[in-house]
Image: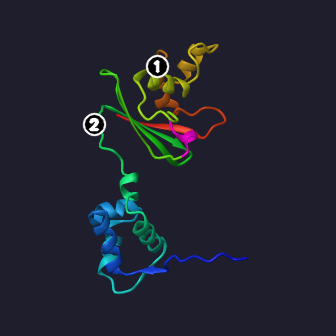
Amino acid sequence: MQKHYVTPNSITAQGIKDIRSRLGMTQREFSEFICVSKPTVERWEMGDKDITGPVALLQQIIMLHPEIAQELSLPEKKLPLRMYYYYKDSLCTVIDIDEVKRIVRIKNYAKNLMFRAFGVNESPTFEDYEEFIESRCFPRSRDKMKIMLEALEIPFYDPILIIEKTNGRMAEDDFWIKIER
C-alpha cells in the first residue's frame, strides 16, 4: 500500500516572507538557516511564481513546530573554548569550556541519550568534562605512548592537543569532535 502525505508541493513569495516573519529572521539569517544563498531568498520573495522543493515542506514543519529554529540555534559563545561533538555529520552536543575557571556549559541537539556527549547529564562538572575528553583519546597508560605522541607531533600527553590532531576519532565509532578557540 502506497503512503500519501499532506505536505505542500509549493510555497508562494508571501509564504516565504511569512515563515521569516514567524521565525523573526532577516533574509540573511533565513538563508543561513535553510542553507541557501541570500540572493536565493531575495529572488523567492520578489518572484511571482510558486517555489517548489524542500522549502515548501519546511513551511509546513515550521507552521507545526515554530520552536524548531530556537532548538537548532547555536548558543552565543561566551567561554574561550568550544567543542562540537558529532555523530557522523550530525551535531549532537556543543560544549563550551573555560579551563582556567573550570566552567563547562553544554547544549544538546540529539534527543537520543546515546548520542549526547554526557548522556543524561545536562550539567556536567569540570571533572566530567575531563573524563569525557580523555575518553576520546588513547589512554595515558598506552604502551609506546611516546611514539604515538611523536607521530602526532605533540610534546606531552594533553587531551585537547590530541583531539585537535585526531578530531577525537576512536577506532570503530563514528563520533568526532571539532574544536573552536
Q: Amino acid at mark 1?
A: Asp
Q: Residue at x 27, y 63 (%)?
A: 24
For the residue labelled by badge 1, is the local secondary structure a helix, a strand or a loop? Answer: loop
Number of the label disc, if any, that sits on residue 158: 1
* Residue sitting at x 58%, y 39%: 114
Q: Position of residue 86 (x, y in %)?
A: 51, 42
Residue receiving disc 2: 78
Label 2 CA crowd tier, 10 Å (few <14, some 14–19, many 20+): few
Q: Is residue 93 left or right of residue 44?
A: right
CA neighbours of label 1 inside 10 A, class few (<14), some (14 to 19), many (20+): some
Say which mark, if any, is on residue 106.
Answer: none
Magenta-colored span: 112-117
Residue 157 included in the magenta stretch of the image? no
Q: Which residue is at the front of the view, 129 or 40?
A: 129
Q: Nearer the viewer, mark 2 or mark 1?
A: 2
Amino acid identity at mark 2? Lys
User: Looking at the rendering, in which quadrant would you find the C terminus?
Assistant: top left
Residue 107 percent coordinates (x, y): 40, 41
Helix, strand or loop status at disc 2: loop
26 up-or-down from 42: above or below:
above
Which badge, 2 or 1, is on the more N-terminal residue?
Answer: 2
User: Can you give x and y, in whole percent of width and height, for residue 73 in the image?
Assistant: 36, 51
Asked whether 48 or 63 is in front, the reply is 63
